[in-house]
Structures are given as C-alpha cells and as structure tokens.
Amino acid sequence: MTIQFNDETFRDDYSFHNSEWAIKRFPFPFHEDSYMYSVNMEQHRGGPDGSVFEKRFDVDEHYVSEMKDRALVLADDPLRCQSLPHMTLAGWDLLELIMVSKSEDYPDLFELHRDGNAWRWINKPLGIDHSFTFLDEATLPYGPMEYITRQAQGDFAVLDQRDDNLWMDAGMVTTQADWSLDFDIGMNFFEWHAPVPLAHEKGIFVRALKFLLNIQQGSPARRLNWTMTVNPLLDTSPENYHKWGIQKTTLTPENIGAKQHLRVELQTFFRLPRSNALVFPIRCYLCSFQDLMTVPKWGRRLHRVIRDLPDELATYKGFIDNRPLMLDYLSKFDDGLPTSPGIWPDLDVEPALQK
Amino acid sequence: MSKFTFPKSITSRPVYGTLEPREGSAHLMIADAEGAEAILDVATPEMMAKAHIIYIPKGEDFEDRLRALKPASFYAGPSYAAAQPRLHKFLADAKMGLQVYLAGTEGLIGQAQSAAMAAGIPHTAIQTEHRGSVARRMQCVHCKGITEDVETDPFVCSHCGLNLFVRDHYSRRLAAYQAVCIDAEDPGNVPEPKGIYE
C-alpha cells in the first residue's frame, strides 16, 4: 500500500491527527483489564498484516512530519543526539540495519543500492538521493547514527555491551517520555533506570538485562511501554519541561477527549553485527482519548486500567493530578461488560457500548 | 561530627566507603574541608613517603595537620577548579600501581573520580569516603549549568534562575545530580527550601 503522509505539527497548533487506519492499528498496550510492570518481552518477528509489529521499522502516516519535528528539536538543542567516541562503528551498524530493513520492507519508499562500500540510498518520502562510502564518515553530512536517525521515526539508544552490562553510550532522543540523554549518557542499565519506582524491587531490571544481554543477531525482541501526554507533544523532554509542564494543567471535562493522549512506546532491541552493540529503538505512538474510545473494547479497558493503577505509577507517569478528570471521562465508556483477552481492537466480536 | 549516613536511595546514587591503606607505587590523595580527617585517619608513615596530597580547605583548619604527615608533596588550593591543572598533570604523569584516595564532599569526590577515570585509572584503584557537608553538585536539566554546594531543596539555579528541585538521579560523567524545575505546572508555587535530608 502507499502511505499518505500527513502534513501536521506536534507543537504550537498541534495539528497532529490519526486517520481511521492509524487508530485501528494503534498499539494499545494493555492485554488485560489491569497493568503492572513485567518484562513482557517477545520476539520481534513480524505481526498481523498492517499492524505496527509487521515490519522491522514501522513507517506510518506521521513519518515526514515527525522528521521535521526532530530537525526542529535538534536545531534548538544539539545535545539530544550524542555518541561517545567508541560508538561510531555501532552507528554504521545501525545505518546498515535501517537502510537494509526499510528498503526490503518498503521497496516503494526506500531503495538501497550497494556495490562494495559504494552505497546509494534513496528515501523518497524525504526527497533524499545520496551516494556515499560505507564506513567513511567524511562522505556523510552527519555521523552515521545521526544521519540515519534523522530519517527514522522514534528515539534510538545505542547500548555498548561490556562487563555483563549495557551502557547508554550513544543516542538520538527527541521524542522521549521525560528522560535526558545528555544526563544519562555513559550510564549502565541499572543507573539509567534508577528513577523508575517499584520495578527494581520486583527484580524486573535484573531479568530484563539478562534477556537483553543474550539477544542474538537476527533475533530482535520487542515490548510495549506507555505513559500519558497532554496535547500530541513528541518532545516531552526534561530539558523543556519548564515550558511544556504547564500544558498538563489545561485539561477540562470539555477538552479532555481531544487533548489527552495515550502515549505508547514500541520498544525493540536488535543486536548489531560489527560492534556487538545493542540498538534500542523507542518508537512513540500517540492517540487521543476520543479516538481510542471509537474502539469499544479499548474504552472499557482503559477506564479499568487507569482506575486501578497504583498511585506510585500514576505519579511516576506524571498524571496523578489529572487522574480524577480522566476517570470521569473514561467511565462513560465502560459499561461493565467483559473484554476479550489481548491488545487487538476485536471490532467484529466485541459489542458496542451498552450505555 | 563529619560522618553522615546517607538514607537508602536509587541505584544511580553513589555510595561511599571508608578509606583504607593499600599497597601502591604511589598514593594520590584528594580532599576538601573535613575530608582531611579521612586522610589523617588512614595515613601511615610508609604511605606518606609516597603520598601526594591535594587539599581544598574551604575554610577548614586542617592544613597544618596534613603537612605534618610529611607527604612526598602537598598542595593546598582555593578551589577544585584552581587545583585542576595540577591534578591533570599528575594524572597524565601517573605510573602503574597508583592508588587514589578521595575524601570530602560529594562534589569533590565526583569530579576527582571523573578526572581519574578519564585518565585511565581503573575504578578498582579509586577509594572514596564522604566527610563533612552533605551539599550536592547539581546540574540544571534545563540550562545545563552546574550549581555547586547546593544545601537546600528546592534551590535557585545559579545560571538561569529557575526554581529547581533536587533529585537523587546522578551522572558520574557530569559528577552531578539532576535538578528539575519545581513550579513548571504551577508557576510561582515554590515550597520553602529545606535541608536536602530534612
């Protein structure tokens, strides 16, 4: 299929919107009517046709506008993209992974022609046709990681593996759920996750690290994570929190359906061949409450999850103050009927709202 | 009383030990203020014959007692920044087998540790002991400016003037804790500052 790319913004007038296609394929993160941390890792080997899991790097209608937003963020704050000196080879690995994957998965949008180290990369949505020499930085306008991640949706953390740990030694981070690459760069897996409540005590990070250290080339993994964002703002960075934090106070019963967004991260993990680094793409999907409510199962379930979430998690995810307003809204879409297991919308089998 | 027991905290927060004498080809000892007491506690005549002390008094009166240990070299300077060129020269000239002892405030320990590791000193050859002030070296996540010796929470960024709260999240690379705007969601609503551990 050919994707119609939206012309939209993730700031100022917030013209971001999801088509009906995008709503139906939204990666709703709750597979049951409650939520608690878990390692919830699975193989990233495709998924149902048209789903966000189908391709290695999902491209959707927001691609072109997201890349414009990334360029704006980087112009304001170049520290959002950093790579420690030993990570350049991993950057080339990542460039290769993305170019190969996208050209194979979306041949109508991307082309990669290779003759030894003489490569030609064609990115039709962004109007790029660039010949360069693989592994020769002088032939690219940016370092290899920055070059390719200016053309790929989602944040990217590139993790060095040594001493039985993972080290956040490079990244492109402009659509993050409130963490700072500039602060966290150089930290190990436990250090950069230090501020997360409850999960350490549950042994989540010890088990997750064990799993990640063993990811093999050609066998990527994935999981979903989520939080809440008022307005479809991609750049919810701590750097700019003093500017966007105030937006969290603008919710009213009238505007919450349009303004409050469920923010879902599709996190994937790929072993890189030359550097043995691990790349951790964190792809952000946004969907307004009112669009989510068009799927009756999701309406019922979101109400129950948000209602029963422990206070620590609602605080950590930054919506404890808005939770009462959210529940007033969401309860209108919960008629108490049971929901089918799994994350899929199940529009054909789940009954319409009975109230 | 120069020793303080820090409350249990998150995994990025540094923990400090107690200096102990080790075998080494040379001993580099860096301390500020009451950190001098940790050096006085660990010093032995054998160690001092190969010891180089860099000390930032910060108004404390330990200089004469440290000199009396008769280290191989002794330097007292007005600030860590002033001591940095000497420290970097020393680390650049360092030989295998150097042992590093850091004592005093978290800001001093963190910065000197970062310098030593950047110079290739293995972390196993670096010991730390906290003494004295529990003030923190804070990085404003918004403007990136560092405010030294922060004693209260919240505090005002010495660079951009935002009201910031003190997190336990710590970067060894920056040798600083993270500080984040406290009144972003309610401008002007800034709680009365309290001591960090009150």
Image: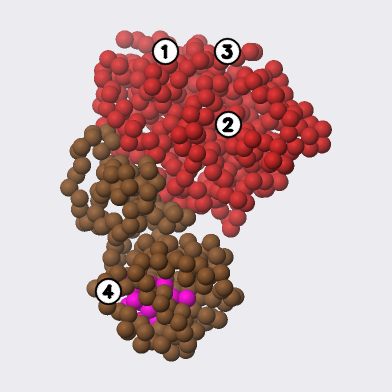
Q: Distance between the residues labelled 1 and 2?
A: 33 Å
Q: Which residue lies furthest to the right in this view?
A: A115
Crowd around label 3: few <14 · some 14–19 · many ≥20 (10 Å) = few
**Hey, what amino acid is under mark 2?**
Arg
Give the quadrant of residue A32.
Answer: top left
Q: Residue at x 36, y 63 (%)?
A: B106
The answer for which chain carries disc 3 is A
**Colour logic:** by chain
User: Which of labels 3 and 4 is toward the front?
Assistant: 4
From the viewer's perspective, is A164 left or right of A294?
A: right
The outermost residue toward the left is: B192
User: Which quadrant of the rendered structure holds the C terminus of chain A?
Assistant: top left
| Closer to the eye: label 3 or 1 | 3
Choose between A270 and B107: the one closer to the eye: B107
Q: Colour of chain B?
A: brown
Which of these two is toward me, B105 or A28?
B105
Whether A240 is drawn above or below A262: the answer is below
Q: What element carries label 2?
A: loop
Q: What residue type is labelled 4?
A: Glu
Question: From which residue to which does the magenta span run?
Answer: B28-42
Q: Can you see residue B54? A: yes
Q: Position of residue B112 (x, y in %)?
A: 44, 65
The three-letter code of the residue at mark 3 reads Gln
Q: Mark 4 points at which residue?
A: B60
Are the residues under badges 3 and 4 in a single subunit? no
Supply the letter of whichever chain is red. Answer: A
Residue A70 vertical placement versus B56 (above, below)? above
* Residue picked out by circle 1: A294
Marks 3/1: CA–CA distance: 22 Å
The disc placed on residue A4 is 3
- What residue is disc 2 on? A150
Q: How far apart are marks 4 and 1 (CA)?
A: 68 Å
